[in-house]
Image (cartoon, rainbow, N blue to C red):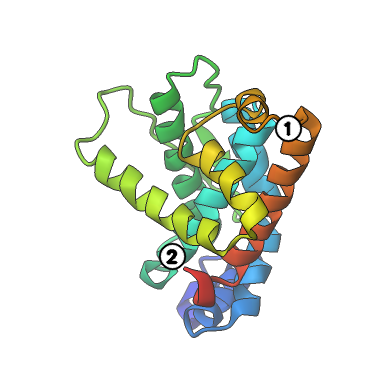
Amino acid sequence: MEELKRDFSDKAMEDFRLIDMAVAGDDNAYARLLQRYKRPVYHMILKMVRNVDDAEDLTIESFAKAFRSLHRFKKDFTFSTWLFRIATNNTIDFIRKKKLNTLSIENTFTDDDGQSVSIDVEDENLDPQEETIRAQKAELIQVFVDKLPSKYQKLVRLRYFHELSYEEIAEELDAPLGTVKAQLHRARELMFEMVKNKRDHI
């Protein structure tokens, strides 16, 4: 760790300490990492998809994927760089799948140490392993859904697995649009809590 201090900022070093604590089973360390980066990750994703609801969903997915792989994190670069790459790749996969025309991504961002980090966006065909990756993501989200109160489960399945819009969900359930949005927002909050409590829920 002494050698790392010469290369990384105090914030990056604190992240490394939190990661070590999280991997050792400290749920509070996961919560602190989430609190540190939830807002910047969300805003980066929002710039890419330009949709608040999608950005919130993708933020949950990004942290879930990062925390599930945290034990494989190498301290070769900052946690923020690694996390932003996971979030970016996950969002690009979403955009390609949806064939959105709203992609607006800066090819670089600045990490905690002021270094310019390049994000490669490839426009080639989807990776052959896409279906496997998508299935893993669905499996991960399913863990969350199964632990939600029953009144939220159908809403979340329609949103995540059937990929219905809020309007379509309201029509499917014969419920007011405002109610659907409010309940899905609450369901996302609950799923964020599950992400923070990673050891018991993922």
Do tag 1 and tag 2 residues touch (Cβ < 8 Å)?
Answer: no
Q: In the displayed structure, would residue 98 be above or below residue 61?
A: above
In the picture, measured across the screen, residue 3 lies left or right of residue 5, that is: left
Q: Secondary structure at mark 2?
A: helix
Select label 1 or label 2 by which is in front. 1
Q: In the displayed structure, would residue 157 be above or below residue 124?
A: below
Answer yes or no: is residue 118 visible: no
Q: Amino acid at mark 2?
A: Arg
| Residue at point 69%, 29% (across, down) | 174
Marks 1 and 2, the one that precedes in the sequence: 2
Q: Which residue is mark 1?
A: 175
Badge 2 crowding class, 10 Å Cα cut-off, few under 14, some 14 to 19, many 20 or more, is some
| Residue at point 57%, 45% (across, down) | 154
Between 125 and 194, the residue placed more toward the observer is 194
Label number found at residue 34: none
Q: Position of residue 135 (x, y in %)?
A: 32, 47
Q: Secondary structure at mark 1?
A: loop
Label number found at residue 68: 2
Q: In the displayed structure, would residue 33 be above or below residue 174?
A: below
Q: In the displayed structure, would residue 71 be above or below residue 40?
A: below
Q: Find the distance from the CA under tag 1 to the CA under tag 2.
A: 35 Å
Q: Amino acid at mark 1?
A: Ala
Q: Position of residue 8 (x, y in %)?
A: 55, 65
Q: Position of residue 32 (x, y in %)?
A: 68, 69
- How many discs mark residues in the rendered view? 2
Q: Position of residue 202 (x, y in %)?
A: 47, 68
